[in-house]
Each structure stands twice: as structure tokens, then as C-alpha cells.
Image: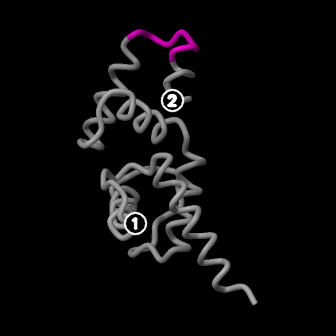
Amino acid sequence: MYPIVNAVTNANAPPDLIPLLERIGTTVFPQLSGVSAQTAAGGIIFNTELTRSMQADLNKLGATPPLVVDGIYGPATKQAAVKFQTAHGLAVDGWAGPVTTAAIATAVKARLNDRAF
């Protein structure tokens, strides 16, 4: 299981929380299902710091229009993730999961290295 799903399950959360996360995840990210949808929904709801970091990184990579770094995984952030995924040959689902997040970090590092003396 993914960390967010484990955390919710281990916290004795109400039994309807996991299905609710899955419904949210499949609504926001129709290409996802099951644990992936639950994890995506949990990430965008509970991990605003990770979303802020990703928004800032996408801005460093030239997100157009620039994203407001507010920790809210809204339509503009999702669209920027889709553009990044498309441009980098990743599965296009709009969710900045582990693969997309790692690719963003790699791209930021490469951009910084290009600017080094």
C-alpha cells in the first residue's frame, strides 16, 4: 500500500474515508483507479507542502501560465502536470505521483546544472 492509504487505515479513520478518497481520485484523475486514485486524492488533500514544492518546481521549468504556489492542486496545477507529462513522454493522467515527481526533480536538477559555471 501507499503511505497515505496506510496512514489513513492505521489511524482508525472512518470506514467510508478510503472509498471517498477513491471517488475523489477517480473524479479528479479519471485514468486512475483503486489504490492509485486513493493515493492521488489523499496527496492533493493532505500534502499541501508537496504540492507547493511541485508548483514551484514546475514554475522553475517554465510553467505557462506560471502557477500560484499555494499548495492547492487545482485545475492550473493539474494542467501543468499534464503538459509536463506530455512533454516528457510520461503516462498522462494529471497526477504528479512518484514517477512524475521524480521526473520533475530530474528536470529541475538538469536545468540548474545547465546554468552552472
Furthest toward the front, the residue is: 89
Whether residue 54 is in magenta: the answer is no
Q: Which image quadrant is residue 81 in?
A: bottom left
Q: Which image quadrant is residue 48 in?
A: top right
Which residue appears at 38% of the width and 52% of the height? 74
Query: In this picture, which residue range is highlighted in magenta?
Result: 9-15
Amino acid type, mark 1? Phe
Which residue appears at 35% of the width and 34% of the height? 37
Q: Is residue 28 above or below residue 87?
A: above
Dominant secondary-structure state across the stretch colored magenta: loop
Q: Is residue 50 above or below residue 22?
A: below
Which residue appears at 60% of the width and 47% of the height? 49
Q: Which mark is residue 29?
A: none
**Residue 27 in the image: x percent, y percent?**
25, 38
Which residue appears at 52% of the width and 20% of the height? 8
Residues 87 and 26: in front is: 87
Q: Which image quadrant is residue 111 in?
A: bottom right
Amino acid type, mark 2? Tyr
**Residue 92 in the image: x percent, y percent?**
30, 55
Kindly state the secondary structure of the residue where label 1 is placed. Answer: helix
Q: Which residue is mark 1?
A: 84
The colour style of the image is: one colour
Residues at marks 2 and 1, CA–CA distance in whole angstroms? 23 Å
Q: Is residue 1 above or below residue 70?
A: above
Q: Quadrant of the C terminus?
A: bottom right
Disc on the earlier residue, 2 or 1: 2
Q: Which mark is residue 2?
A: 2
